[in-house]
Image (cartoon, rainbow, N blue to C red):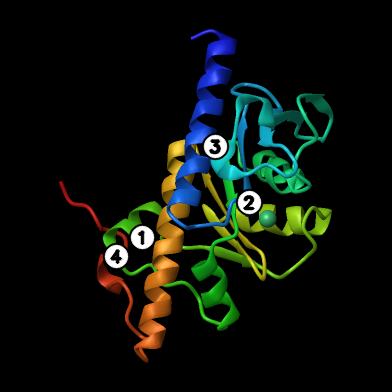
Amino acid sequence: MTDAALRRNLLEQLMDAGRLVVERGLVLASGGNLSVRVPGTDTMLVTASGTWLDRLRPGDFAELTLGGEHRGGPRPSVEWRLHARTYAVRADVEAVVHLHPQHVLLVDLLGERIRFTTLDHRFYLGSAGRVPFAPAGSIELAESAAQAAQDHDAVVLAHHGCSTLGATVEMALRRALNLEEAATMTYRLLLAGNHEADFPEEWRDRIIDV
Ligand SMILES: [Zn+2]
């Protein structure tokens, strides 16, 4: 694939992801931002400031170096540092999905941890980091989230949202969907008065046997 075709393909994946997370009710129309690393470079493509995730077009992405130098496109989301710092510390990560989903935030507001109770939750995530509130767009938030991302593929940002990471847009998206589902199930367990149910300890390291 040529560079231009590769870039167009990556943008199509991000546009599809944006439509899907809004359709699935993970976020309101502009609650988050999406990015990909341009393969083999130190630049990324990130959604522009003020974009609606379910109405993204190819012209809605800014190209920036991980250091923040603007290389093309519109003004990036104010949260670009959150993406850039994570790429800087995780060489294996090629896509970041940052969203503001309700149940992830609800469980955190209740002072509870998200429980990864099913096979899918264990397979795609298994754990999530958590960082305290810091203003959107701040270096402080980007740094604390990047630190948590060294140990987890999902990071909960208190009173704000979450980031999920992947080697592909599809994997970052699957992790976002599974994180919100795990949070929804945790919330329902809490509503049912349950504070204990979790994935069996003895199977956590052997969820698939072929
Ligand atoms: Zn945000």
Give the image quadrant in which the ligand numbered 1 is located. Answer: bottom right
| Residue type at the position of mark 1 | His
Q: Label 1, on which residue?
A: 121
Residue 170 vs residue 50, the one in the foreground: 50
| Image x and y of residue 81, in percent | 76, 45
User: Do the numbered discs 3 and 4 sit on residues whose CB atoms are within 8 Å?
Assistant: no
Which of disc 4 and disc 2 is earlier in sequence? 2
| Residue type at the position of mark 2 | Gly
| Image x and y of residue 181, in percent | 39, 63
Q: Cβ(mark 2) to ligand 1 < 8 Å?
A: yes
Q: Look at the picture and state if 202 lies above or below 9.
A: below
Question: Which residue is at the far left?
Answer: 210
Residue that appears at 49% across and 44% down: 172
> How many labels, in total?
4
Q: Look at the picture and state if 125 lies above or below 172.
A: below
Eye-nearest disc, 2 or 4: 2
Q: Label 3, on which residue?
A: 92
Which of disc 2 and disc 3 is earlier in sequence? 2
Residue that appears at 61% across and 25% down: 58
- As measured in the structure, the alpha-carbon distance from the residue carrying label 1 to the one carrying label 2 is 22 Å
